[in-house]
Amino acid sequence: MPFKADVSQWIAERGEGEISHCEPLAGGDINEALRLTTSKGTSYFLKTHTNPPRQMFEVEALGLEALREALARCHSTALRVPQVFLSGKSFLLLEDLRPSTKCRDYWELLGRGLAYLHKDTRPCFGFTREREGKTSQVDNYCGLTPQPNPPTPDGYSFFAEARLLHQTELAMAKGLLNRADLRDMESLCQRLPQLIPEQPASLIHGDLWSGNAHTGPAGEPVLIDPAAHWGWAEAEIAMTRLFGGFAPAFYQAYLETRPLDAGWEDRLDLYNLYHVLNHANLFGQGYVGQARTILRKYL
């Protein structure tokens, strides 16, 4: 296990003794998940991958930390994000939030907490970090697909270049889309200002489907596996509808806390075109027809 020496050393330096038990956990499609228990009885959650993409765990750690910091700034306790303890090339060591049964107001807490998170805004879209007085761009991953996050003042340019056209170019390289599809996508990108109202750059989870809305030890909502960046909040809400949707109470609580512009439900497919294309790039031809249907719907 390539992670073992680094993690064992970190645990020993904290006075937690040594790893006494390593329990495999079900659930992840990309990474192996383990619960580590130390000889002092403390448990940790570990994600590991034998051959991950470059800096995959390091940039996920930055996303989790950004989400935690934003929730702290808005003093929101409705929503949790696991604490990051250690990251490396092949692993990510996190706070162990053992799942329980959803609490009675789980969906209301998730909706309200996400709305508070989306109130954290920046002048630029994309994702950056500050280190030693310098700002640097942080590109991350949506699943295993590289997700570029260039600092971009204009949301339309960001969504066009770093999201829709990026995925289109990947799909063309794999032979999934053709030049006619590219022309259609370029036409759609030119129309984005007519189709989408102006919105600030909000901090969003970036890959928020039901599988990434975890349930914590007290039944509270927990955000996991982010593709975090500053983007359109409506795009986040759209993602929650892509694979079955969340409970109605989630949307009611969100809208009561942070109302969306009129007609937001008519724009959901447009935002989700990014994720449908990503699924085509990850899983193949089965998603191409859906992507083309959405593309032509907005032309």
Image (cartoon, rainbow, N blue to C red):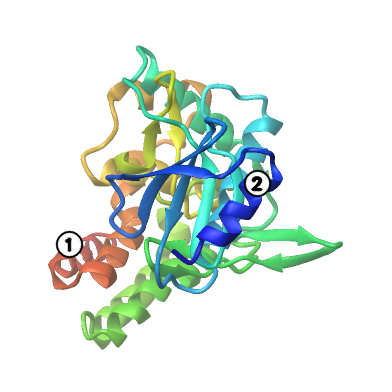
Residue type at mark 1: give it: Gln
Disc 1 or 2, which lies upstream in sequence?
2
Q: Is residue 43 above or below residue 234?
A: above
Asked if the residue at tag 2 contacts the one at tag 1, i.e. Cβ–Cβ closer than 8 Å, the answer is no
SS type, badge 1? helix
Which quadrant, please, contains the C terminus? bottom left
Residue 255 visible here: no
Q: Which residue is mark 2?
A: 12
Residue at the image point whose x is 62% and y is 33% from the top: 71
Q: Residues within 10 Å of mark 1 (few under 14, many from 20)?
A: some
Q: Is residue 176 above or below residue 277?
A: below
Instruction: Please report the residue visible at 77 percent of the width from the left and 64 percent of the height from the top.
Output: 135
Query: Mark 2 Cα within 10 Å, few/some/many (few <14, many 20+)?
Result: few
Instruction: Find residue 290 and name its label.
Output: 1
Residue 248 lies, with reference to residue 184, above or below; the image says above
| In front: label 1 or label 2 | 2
Which quarter of the image is occupied by the N terminus?
A: bottom left
The image position of residue 83, as x and y in percent, is 59, 39
In the figure, residue 252 lies in which quadrant?
top left
Q: Amino acid at mark 2?
A: Ala
Instruction: Tell me if residue 240 can be seen.
Output: yes
Q: Nearer the viewer, residue 65 or 27?
A: 27
Judged from this view, the residue extending furthest toward the right is 133
Q: Which of the numbered marks, if any, corresponds to residue 238?
A: none
Residue 292 horizontal/vertical position (percent): 20, 68
Query: Considering depth in this image, is 34 or 97 the residue closer to the camera?
Result: 34
For image coordinates 23% across by 45% down, the residue present is 243
Where residue 258 appears, x then y in whole percent? 52, 28
Q: CA distance from mark 1 to mark 2?
A: 51 Å
Which residue is nearer to you in this view: 65 or 34?
A: 34
User: Does dot 2 land on a helix, a strand or a loop?
Assistant: helix
